[in-house]
Image (cartoon, rainbow, N blue to C red):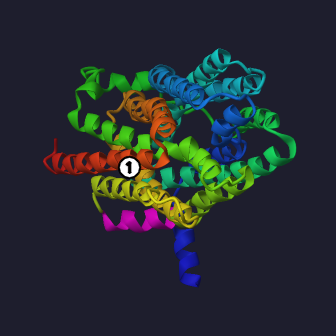
């Protein structure tokens, strides 16, 4: 037991103070993120929207995410990550507070589009911040610490949210989401100072660098498609799966929150030691990406049977193991591939891969569920994983050939 404890502590050593501060504000922010995991249920139960309406709202959610990721990358390359993070998160907080007062279908589509366009400017910026504040050999663990903080917050958030919904209803969640966004960025601006080196200065060192090089990188395009397929499957954790828990297994919001908490608990306890262990083994990043796709595909194949409650636990454990490899190592691949001075553009394309999945995953999945049922959707989602496995193996081969 003592050895396990020492190994756990060791996995956190050597990370910069700024990374710890980033983790702290991520924890504060995500602990207040209570609306998103229950958004599909809120739209269905409180606002009375149909499955088709909900799928369109999540499509606009994804469109806003794409716009925000692209815009965030461009603004990060121009103004630096610090300013983009501060403005984005502050305005996101205000938007979440306003969102609760919208009850029409068209209004909610527009509201969620604007909110996510602002919110996801934050994503490329924080990825660049990780690269700026951590040594190359610590980047994976820095990402792991940030994810640990985010997931710890997400564990607190949905669990409390499920209880709050049962006692008080959904509206108070929008206030909590908004105010914690504002509190997190005020804390960030107080603890972390804007770095002196700006993207424009970094580009002066590489004046002949092609600004569109990211769009000509075939291996990075393959990686982006893998991320898209990964997102197509994984994001159903927050869209179709809560509805599945409710419709098929008749679980209330509190019990759904407990299942989501299991995902978080595994990550908080095991992800950092796992990443520390894997980093010492010097295994190629692309092998980790391939294994994450295998685990994700198996998690949805497991859901094909729907007569045993325990399969939900099997599914969430497999998804969590996949997530623990998939997100840190796809992120590491993107950071390693990014050219100096153009980090924002690379991380924007990385973020946009998942943002596109936010558009198509709920729309396609909920439409399939509406027409053919949940089980057909799980088989199709398994297919996304199989395609991703093939592409990941191809990417691994290309990287070995230095392409």
Report whether 233 appears left or right of 283. Answer: right
Residue 283 seen anywhere in this rendered image of the structure: yes
- As drawn, 196 above or below 270: above
Crowd around label 1: few <14 · some 14–19 · many ≥20 (10 Å): some
State which quarter of the image contains the N terminus: bottom right
Q: Which residues are magenta?
A: 271-282
Residue underneath mark 1 = 379
State which quarter of the image contains the C terminus: top left
Going by the picture, which residue comes out furthest to the front?
372
Helix, strand or loop: magenta stretch: helix
Residue depicted at x 28% and y 52%: 286
Report whether 275 appears left or right of 103. Answer: left
- As drawn, 202 above or below 307: above
Q: Quadrant of residue 131?
A: top left
Residue 288, percent from left and from top: 33, 57
Report whether 240 appears left or right of 274. Answer: right
- As drawn, 373 above or below 87: below
Residue 49, percent from left and from top: 66, 28
Instruction: Name the foreground residue: 153 vs 369.
Output: 369
Residue depicted at x 80% and y 33%: 171
- As drawn, 268 above or below 213: below
**Is residue 13 within the magenta segment?**
no
Residue 233, percent from left and from top: 43, 45
Residue 106, percent from left and from top: 63, 15
**Is residue 279 within the magenta segment?**
yes
SS at mark 1?
helix
Instruction: Name the foreground residue: 225 vs 129.
Output: 225
Q: Quadrant of residue 5?
A: bottom right
Instruction: Name the foreground residue: 271 vs 80.
Output: 271
Going by the picture, which residue comes out furthest to the right?
168
């Amino acid at each position: 037991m003592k050895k396990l404890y020492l190994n756990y502590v060791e996995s956190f050593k050597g990370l910069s103070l700024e990374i710890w501060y980033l983790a702290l504000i991520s924890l504060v922010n995500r602990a207040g993120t209570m609306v998103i995991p229950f958004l599909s249920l809120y739209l269905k139960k409180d606002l009375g929207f149909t499955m088709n309406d909900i799928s369109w709202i999540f499509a606009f959610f994804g469109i806003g995410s794409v716009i925000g990721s692209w815009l965030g990358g461009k603004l990060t390359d121009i103004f630096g990550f610090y300013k983009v993070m501060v403005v984005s998160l502050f305005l996101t907080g205000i938007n979440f507070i306003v969102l609760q007062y919208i009850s029409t279908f068209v209004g909610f589509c527009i509201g969620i589009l604007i909110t996510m366009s602002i919110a996801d400017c934050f994503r490329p910026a924080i990825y660049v911040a990780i690269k700026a504040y951590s040594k190359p050999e610590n980047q994976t663990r820095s990402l792991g610490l940030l994810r640990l903080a985010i997931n710890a917050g997400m564990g607190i958030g949905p669990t409390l949210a499920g209880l709050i919904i049962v006692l008080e209803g959904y509206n108070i969640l929008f206030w909590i989401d908004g105010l914690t966004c504002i509190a997190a960025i005020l804390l960030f601006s107080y603890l972390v100072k804007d770095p002196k080196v700006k993207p424009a200065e970094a580009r002066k060192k590489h004046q002949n660098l092609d600004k569109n090089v990211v769009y000509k990188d075939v291996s990075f395009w393959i990686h982006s498609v893998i991320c898209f397929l990964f997102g197509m499957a994984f994001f159903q954790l927050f869209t179709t799966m809560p509805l599945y828990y409710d419709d098929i297994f008749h679980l209330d919001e509190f019990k759904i929150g407990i299942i989501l908490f299991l995902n978080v608990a595994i990550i908080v306890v095991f992800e950092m030691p796992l990443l520390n262990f894997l980093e010492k083994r010097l295994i190629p990043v692309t092998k980790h990406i391939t294994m994450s796709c295998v685990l994700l595909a198996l998690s949805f194949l497991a859901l094909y049977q729907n007569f045993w409650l325990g399969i939900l636990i099997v599914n969430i454990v497999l998804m969590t193991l996949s997530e623990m490899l998939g997100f840190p190592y796809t992120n590491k691949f993107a950071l390693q591939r990014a050219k100096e001075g153009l980090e924002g553009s690379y991380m924007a394309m990385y973020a946009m891969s998942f943002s596109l999945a936010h558009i198509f995953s709920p729309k396609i999945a909920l439409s399939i569920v509406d027409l053919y049922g949940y089980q057909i959707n799980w088989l199709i989602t398994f297919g996304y994983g199989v395609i991703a496995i093939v592409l990941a193996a191809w990417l691994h081969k290309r990287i070995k050939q230095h392409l």
